[in-house]
Structure formats: C-alpha cells, structure tokens
Image: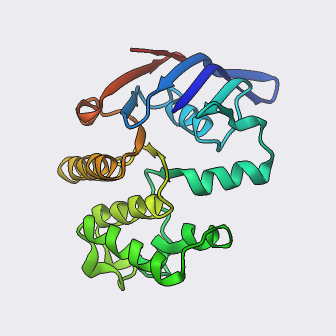
Amino acid sequence: MLEARNIHKLFHNGKKQLQVLKGIDLNIERGKFVAIVGPSGAGKSTLLHILGGLDSPTQGKVALRGQDIYSLGDKELSRLRNREIGFVFQFYHLLPEFTVLENVLLPALICRSISAKSSQQIKGQAAGLLHQAGLGYRQGHFPGQLSGGEKQRVAIIRALINQPQLLFCDEPTGNLDSETGSEIIRLINDLRLKNQMTVVMVTHNLELAKICDRVYHLSDGILVN
C-alpha cells in the first residue's frame, strides 16, 4: 500500500542544520493499523507529513501503490491527498462558524467537481458516518457546543468523507483524557475494519498503540521494530 525508501529530512536554522530523519525505510500493508511511537521531538509528525504528501523529504522516495507521490505536480498531489488520503490531527481544526455536518462535508465539496455523487448522496453518506460515530444527533450543532472527544470524532468523520484508502492520525488523542482517548482509538479501528482502510498513527502513548497490528519506534531519526 505504502512504501518509503531512504527518507531523510534536514532542517536549516541559519547556519545550523538539524537532521531529523536519517534514512527511514518503511513498508505498510493494505488494511493494517500501524503505529509509530516515540518521545516528543523524535520526528514522528515530520515522518507522517512526508508519508502523507504534506512535506517533501530532503532525500528519499514515498510510493503509494507504486506511484512516487513526490514525482507528481502540485495539483496532482493535492488531488491525491483530497481523494485517497485522510488526515486526523491532535488539534481538531473544525471551522467554528459551520455546523458538524457542514464541517464533515467540506472535503467532499472540494472534491465535488471530480465526483459523480449528487449533493444529497454526499449528505446521506456524511449522516451515515456521523451515526456510526454516535454523533447523528449532533449534525446541526456547532463545534463550540461539543466536548473534546466529540470534536475529534467529527474530525475523524471529516477525514473519511471522501472514502480514503489511507488514513494518517497525528497524536489523535493528545488533547483528550485517557478514557476518551481509548474510545477514539477504538472508533478509528472500528471504522478501519468497516471501510477496509489502512491507518498510520503516530503517538507517544505506548498503551494506545497496543491495539495496532504493528508498532515501530522512532528514535534519533531511525525507525526500528
């Protein structure tokens, strides 16, 4: 499903250089739930952004189903992210002036010009996903009326509205208490199984990573099993 080869990432700060990733190799099989764990500052989010096409590597290659994503032009890469990849972040990034349903629909509306689905079909799909997540009664509410766990569930459903084959989660429980965080991870796993997705999650929480099919550890720019 996803392959990374010899990924390096170098940041420049004036005359200083910081090498965050030092030759990462990674294969992720279709349908698996993979965790990348490590302490804060280890480069987990940097690696996730590179795997998801949000930030290019200094050196190396990332291939989705054999296609080198960084060989694509900007428009093609943006289209790939919108249609085939979902993202869930630690901070929910919901638009406060939009309802829950409207927030969920945003990626689908961006994709609408290249989709055969009607507006009603897309709304029905969004309502169905919200119902799966226990948020059917919250569709007309605004983000300010939701708890932290509810906001993250909305962010997850928004990431799934275009039916991506690959979901990236960047510390998805970082702002939540342990019980709510566990509920969020279970929800992600349930939706993965129902929708036959591949999920890659970065976290510093080893306990939450136990649900995953495979766990990698990132330390000093190197990824190990």
Which residue lies at the image location 49% right of the left edge and 81% below the top edge? 98
Count of numbered marks: 0
Q: Residue furthest left?
A: 179
User: Compared with residue 139, is residue 57 higher up or lower down, i.e. above or below?
Assistant: above
**Residue 44, x across and y down, in percent:** 50, 31
Q: Quadrant of the C terminus?
A: top left
**Residue 43, x across and y down, in percent:** 54, 29
**Image-based side of 18 in relation to 154, left or right:** right
**Residue 9, x across and y down, in percent:** 67, 25
Of residues 183 and 164, the one drawn nearer to the viewer in this rendering: 164
**Image-based side of 208 in relation to 53, left or right:** left
**Image-based side of 11 in relation to 161, left or right:** right
Which residue lies at the image location 74% right of the left edge and 26% below the top edge? 58
Which residue lies at the image location 59% right of the left edge and 40% below the top edge? 49
Which residue lies at the image location 55% right of the left edge and 69% below the top edge? 108
**Image-based side of 55 in relation to 154, left or right:** right
Q: How is the image coloured?
A: rainbow
Of residues 164 and 6, the one drawn nearer to the viewer in this rendering: 164
**Residue 75, x across and y down, in percent:** 77, 54
Q: Quadrant of residue 110?
A: bottom right
